[in-house]
């Protein structure tokens, strides 16, 4: 209403109201008026966010000053508006009661213009401070909502463990790079290249979507960290960023679950004329993990011989095979039925590797 | 009965606007009879609570305009209302208030007439 702010005068005496309104207007305020508490409250609710200070008489019909004050303090939208109680000198007891009820300050009648000006200045300053705090609170809330939404989106694009890592306090340190023993499982499809050559893109995407959904469920169930999907190839690691004592066992159990579920998918695809098989390579070893990439696009990745070994084993696996590296096999001997598949010569590795196929879980 | 300096101060502190003070006085002249009626009605009904509000309003508006004696009597009436017991003195005070009111009214009307001719 006015640059300096808007006051509401609640007083049943028309002489006092007239004078107070005039004095407030002289101070540069816009003024609304009410003849009693009931009217005052309805003016307040009809003008949300408009009124910066209320001058409240104590003795009034309908709803007196105490009741009006109590009603204001019980209302979230009015609670913060400063209230100056206007009373006569004989009523100082009631002033105390009003301050206890939440009034900001008081003025005695007849009103001294200088004291009025000082009280109004103080109240407007308090109100402005409150409004600024409110604004900053709202900005913070909006920011928090944005951050929350970003986290949710992030967890859709990244594996949940990595999304959590990015938004955690120690995230920066872990992202910067660290060395740890991990189990890597590398899965891909047999016959995928042939299938892709023969099929429409829609069919390829359809098959990949079913395959990835099945894989994704198994990854989550076993607590794996998905490093990436690359067409039919999927790389998952365990024991990072969340430490897992049983990381080899988890990887093997996940691979067996995937193989079982893959059989169902493969049957459906077989009826559509697609012949696809599923192979997995699993290896254990040390890798450096952290942020890999360049400004603008990073992955959370693992680098080390262990990832190469898992990938090579996967590419050597026949349809339905889960090939373990010698170390992986030693670490979980007790829980699997295994068959020796002999020494495999793997691309990029100088010595042949003694590999084992997981036949079943014990 | 009427402290003229109060009116002059009012005029100065509200921006030397005689029209505003006249407005204030006219509002007061229209209001007081209602408050006197309220006071007398409360006493006739022996209702001490009902006495408080009109006496209170009359007290503060009279003080605002410099009608100090009327303000004093109204204060006494308000206190009596708050004490909870009305008696013969209360009735007497109400009569004093009404008598004082006619003095105040005359004085204010004079004041209005005087400022009118000033312009």
Image: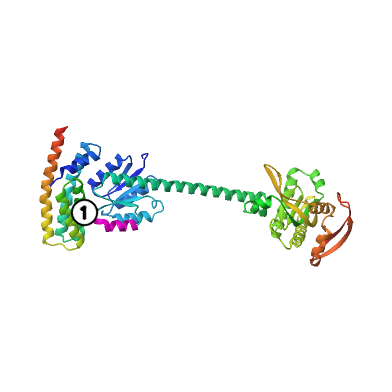
Toward which corner of the image does residue B28 lie, by quadrant? top left
Using the image, determine if residue A312 lies above or below residue A5.
Answer: below
Query: Is residue B23 at least partly visible in the picture?
Result: no
Q: Which corner quadrant holds the N terminus of chain A?
A: top left
Q: Residue at x 80, y 63 (%)?
A: A331
| SS for callout 1 | helix
A13 horizontally vs A258: left or right:
left
According to the picture, the residue beneath numbered tag 1 turns out to be B56
Query: Is A213 in front, or is A267?
Result: A213
Q: Which corner quadrant holds the C terminus of chain A?
A: bottom right
Residue B4 image offset from top left, x and y in percent = 15, 42
Q: Which residues are magenta?
A: A90-100
Q: Main secondary structure of the magenta part?
A: helix
The number of numbered discs placed on residues in the rendered structure image is 1
Using the image, determine if residue A47 lies above or below residue A358.
Answer: above
Residue A333 image offset from top left, x and y in percent = 81, 65
Magenta stretch contains residue A99: yes
Using the image, determine if residue B80 lies above or below residue A34.
Answer: below
Q: Chain of mark 1?
A: B
Tell me how the rendering is colored. Answer: rainbow
Q: Residue furthest top?
A: B119
Magenta stretch contains residue B8: no
Residue A240 image offset from top left, x and y in percent = 71, 56
Query: Is residue A195 at least partly visible in the picture?
Result: yes
A212 horizontally vs A348: left or right:
left
Q: Residue at x 13, y 48 (%)?
A: B101
Residue B12 image offset from top left, x and y in percent = 23, 39
A56 horizontally vs B77: left or right:
right
Instruction: Determine crowd level at label 1: few under 14, some 14-19, many 20+ residues with C-alpha closer than 10 A.
Output: many
């Amino acid at each position: 209403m006015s640059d300096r702010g808007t006051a509401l005068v609640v007083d049943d005496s028309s002489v006092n109201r007239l004078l107070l309104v005039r004095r407030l207007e002289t101070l540069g305020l816009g003024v609304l008026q009410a003849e009693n508490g009931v009217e005052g409250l309805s003016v307040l609710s009809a003008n949300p966010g408009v009124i910066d200070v209320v001058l409240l008489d104590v003795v009034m019909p309908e709803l007196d000053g105490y009741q009006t004050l109590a009603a204001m303090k019980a209302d979230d939208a009015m609670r913060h508006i400063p209230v100056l109680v206007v009373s006569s000198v004989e009523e100082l007891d009631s002033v105390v009661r009003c301050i206890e009820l939440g009034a900001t300050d008081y003025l005695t009648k007849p009103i001294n213009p200088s004291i009025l000006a000082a009280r109004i200045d103080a109240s407007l300053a308090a109100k402005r401070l409150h409004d600024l705090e409110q604004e900053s609170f709202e900005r913070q809330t909006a920011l928090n909502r944005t951050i929350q939404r970003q986290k949710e989106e992030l967890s859709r694009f990244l594996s949940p463990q990595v999304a959590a890592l990015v938004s955690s306090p120690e995230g920066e340190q872990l992202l910067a790079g660290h060395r740890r023993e991990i189990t890597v499982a590398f899965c891909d499809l047999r016959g995928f290249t042939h299938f892709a050559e023969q099929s429409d893109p829609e069919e390829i995407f359809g098959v990949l979507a079913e395959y990835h959904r099945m894989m994704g469920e198994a990854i989550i169930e076993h607590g794996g960290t998905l490093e990436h999907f690359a067409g039919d190839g999927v790389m998952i690691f365990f024991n990072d960023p969340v430490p897992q004592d049983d990381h080899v066992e988890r990887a093997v159990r996940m691979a067996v679950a995937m193989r079982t579920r893959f059989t169902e998918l493969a049957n459906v695809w077989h009826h559509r004329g697609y012949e696809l098989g599923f192979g997995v390579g699993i290896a254990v070893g040390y890798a450096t993990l952290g942020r890999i990439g360049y400004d603008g696009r990073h992955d959370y990745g693992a680098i080390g011989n262990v990832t190469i070994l898992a990938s090579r084993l996967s590419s050597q696996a026949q349809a339905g095979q889960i090939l373990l590296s010698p170390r992986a096999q030693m670490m979980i001997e007790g829980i699997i039925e295994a068959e020796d598949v002999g020494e495999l010569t793997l691309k990029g590795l100088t010595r042949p590797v003694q590999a084992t196929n997981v036949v079943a879980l014990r | 009965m009427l402290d003229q300096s109060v009116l002059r101060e009012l005029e100065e502190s509200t921006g030397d606007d005689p029209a505003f003070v006249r407005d204030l006085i006219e509002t007061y002249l229209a209001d007081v009879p209602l408050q006197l009626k309220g006071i007398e009605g409360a006493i006739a009904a022996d209702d001490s609570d009902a006495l408080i509000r009109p006496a209170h309003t009359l007290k503060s508006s009279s003080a605002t305009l410099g009608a100090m004696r009327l303000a004093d009597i109204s204060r006494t009436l308000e206190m009596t209302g708050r004490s909870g017991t009305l008696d013969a003195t209360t009735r007497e005070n109400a009569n004093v208030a009404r008598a004082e009111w006619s003095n105040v009214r005359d004085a204010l009307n004079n004041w209005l007439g005087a400022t009118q001719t000033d312009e």
